[in-house]
């Protein structure tokens, strides 16, 4: 059973229950009110007779005859008068059923010494009757009987409730049709999600996206599905790039190792040279694999381990570690006396990569400076050198994988993954990595990401 059918089914069940309770409550209330109204009408007839008797000087038979003539019954009512234990007069209008021929009932009415109410069956259904005896000198001289055909009144209530029930049924059908239409509109994005997932599963095309309109829960589901597709597409792209990069970059050292091992002779010097070359190539392969794995992990949620980072300590520590990389003029440009939320190890790794890159593109005596600052709500970490700089056309390209810059002065032949790692670390911090020309010449590599201040907690000792 589809979700649309279940939603409409449960909706109709709730609406049907509500309408059933409403119809039943209406039926019950109308019957109670009908009985109250019938009793009130009979009581009113008895009260009117008493009032008429108080204001009349006629004898009891004459009083009852006159009162019967001037008091016309309403619809579904009939009156008659009992004298000497027998029905003497009744209303001119023919009643739905004749009860004055029922001797037992007439005798019971004639025997009443005070106003009495009761029920009685008839050919027209159940009736409600009231008898008002007329007493003179302590003796019952006659009685006035008012009868209401209760079942005929009740039929009107039944008809009204039947119309109400039919109206409720029509409303239920309309609610079902409207619910089916509304459920279809509401669940349309869900069906679109399912069809899109089926098409993606069949074709493997992760570029498809859902059109999100509105701000309800279903639209939020469609947006979440799009975000999931974005992450899946990025994950597959990272996997594809990893495989392509690994295959491309590892093929050369593997070929070199295999070729030298196949040509290796028995001469000890030749074997030693070959083993040294193979060991160096295997080390390079190991570094390439480690870098590729790190780049692949940079797309995962757990890539960063966030904590409190003192920017001043980070800057000074990087310069201290970098001094061993080459004979250069090392300098701290500026330090930010701020604490931020970041991954200290990853930022250190990125800055060391930038410093190593600066060493490869400078010579002895050149200046390499490291600095940190907080400007306009962003943290800035940079490495500046006085080398040849980076041409404008290469400033974006060098951050791609396996792209090597020109003008190297060192002997280290990297795989071209260092700046790609720097960019991945910056992006993991929701920031950017870029290069521009430094003041006075050379290159300035800059990492920038949003500044999130850590609140200062004061403690007091007593």
Image (cartoon, rainbow, N blue to C red):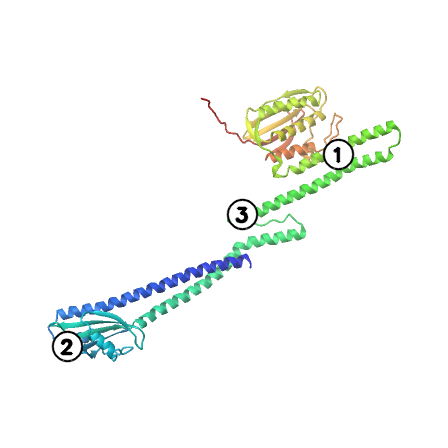
Label 3 near label 2: C-beta < 8 Å? no
Q: Is 346 left or right of 28, judged from the image as shown?
A: right
- The answer to which image quadrant residue 82 occupies is bottom left
Residue highlighted by disc 2: 61
Label 1 near label 2: C-beta < 8 Å? no
* Residue occupying image coordinates x 39% and y 61%: 22
Residue highlighted by disc 3: 220
Check the picture and name the quadrant holding the C terminus: top left
**Which badge, 2 or 1, is on the more N-terminal residue?**
2
Q: Secondary structure at mark 2?
A: helix
Q: Nearer the viewer, residue 171 or 137?
A: 137
- Look at discs 1 and 3 and give the one toward the viewer: 1
Q: Is 263 left or right of 5, judged from the image as shown?
A: right
Q: Secondary structure at mark 3?
A: helix
Label 3 near label 1: C-beta < 8 Å? no
Question: x and y percent of residue 155 in the render?
Answer: 34, 71
Give me the C-alpha separation between circle 2 and circle 3: 87 Å
* Residue occupying image coordinates x 72% and y 35%: 289
Question: x and y percent of residue 336 in the render?
Answer: 57, 24
Q: Residues within 10 Å of mark 3 (few under 14, many from 20)?
A: some
Question: x and y percent of residue 358 in the render?
Answer: 69, 26
- The answer to which image quadrant residue 159 occupies is bottom left
* Residue occupying image coordinates x 23% and y 73%: 146
């Amino acid at each position: 059973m589809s979700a649309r059918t279940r939603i409409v089914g449960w909706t109709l069940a709730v609406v049907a229950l509500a309408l059933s309770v409403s119809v039943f409550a209406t039926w019950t209330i109308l019957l109670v009110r009908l009985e109250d109204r019938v009793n009130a009408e009979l009581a009113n007839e008895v009260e009117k007779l008493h009032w008429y008797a108080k204001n009349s000087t006629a004898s009891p038979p004459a009083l009852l005859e006159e009162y019967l003539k001037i008091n016309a019954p309403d619809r579904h009512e009939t009156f008659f008068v009992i004298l000497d234990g027998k029905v003497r007069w009744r209303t001119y209008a023919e009643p739905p059923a004749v009860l004055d021929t029922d001797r037992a009932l007439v005798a019971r009415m004639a025997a009443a010494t005070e106003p009495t109410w009761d029920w009685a069956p008839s050919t027209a259904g159940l009736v409600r009757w009231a008898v008002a005896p007329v007493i003179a000198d302590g003796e019952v001289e006659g009685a006035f009987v008012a009868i209401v055909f209760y079942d005929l009144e009740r039929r009107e209530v039944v008809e009204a409730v039947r119309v109400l029930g039919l109206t409720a049924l029509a409303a239920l059908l309309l609610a079902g049709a409207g619910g089916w239409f509304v459920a279809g509109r509401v669940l349309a994005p869900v069906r679109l999600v399912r069809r899109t997932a089926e098409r993606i599963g069949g074709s493997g095309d992760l570029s498809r996206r859902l059109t999100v309109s509105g701000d309800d829960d279903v639209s939020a589901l469609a947006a979440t599905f799009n975000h999931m597709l974005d992450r899946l597409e990025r994950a597959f792209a990272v996997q594809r790039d990893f495989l392509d990069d690994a295959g491309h970059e590892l093929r050369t050292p593997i070929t070199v190792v295999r070729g030298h091992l196949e040509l290796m002779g028995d001469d000890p010097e030749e074997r030693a040279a070959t083993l040294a070359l193979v060991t160096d190539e295997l080390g390079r392969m190991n570094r390439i694999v480690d870098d590729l794995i790190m780049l692949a992990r940079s797309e995962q949620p757990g890539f960063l381990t966030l904590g409190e980072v003192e920017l001043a300590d980070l800057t000074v520590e990087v310069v201290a570690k970098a001094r061993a990389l080459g004979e250069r003029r090392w300098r701290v440009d500026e330090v930010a006396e701020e604490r931020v939320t970041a991954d200290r190890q990853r930022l250190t790794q990125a800055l060391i990569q930038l410093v190593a890159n600066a060493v490869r593109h400078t010579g002895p005596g050149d200046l390499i400076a490291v600095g940190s600052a907080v400007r306009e709500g962003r943290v800035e970490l940079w490495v500046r050198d006085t080398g040849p700089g980076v041409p404008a056309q290469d400033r974006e390209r060098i951050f791609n994988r396996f792209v090597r810059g020109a003008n190297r002065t060192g002997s280290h032949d990297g795989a071209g993954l260092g700046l790609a790692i720097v960019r991945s670390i910056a992006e993991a911090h929701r920031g950017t990595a870029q290069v521009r020309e430094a003041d006075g010449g050379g290159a300035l590599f800059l990492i920038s990401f949003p500044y999130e201040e850590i609140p200062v907690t004061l403690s007091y000792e007593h």
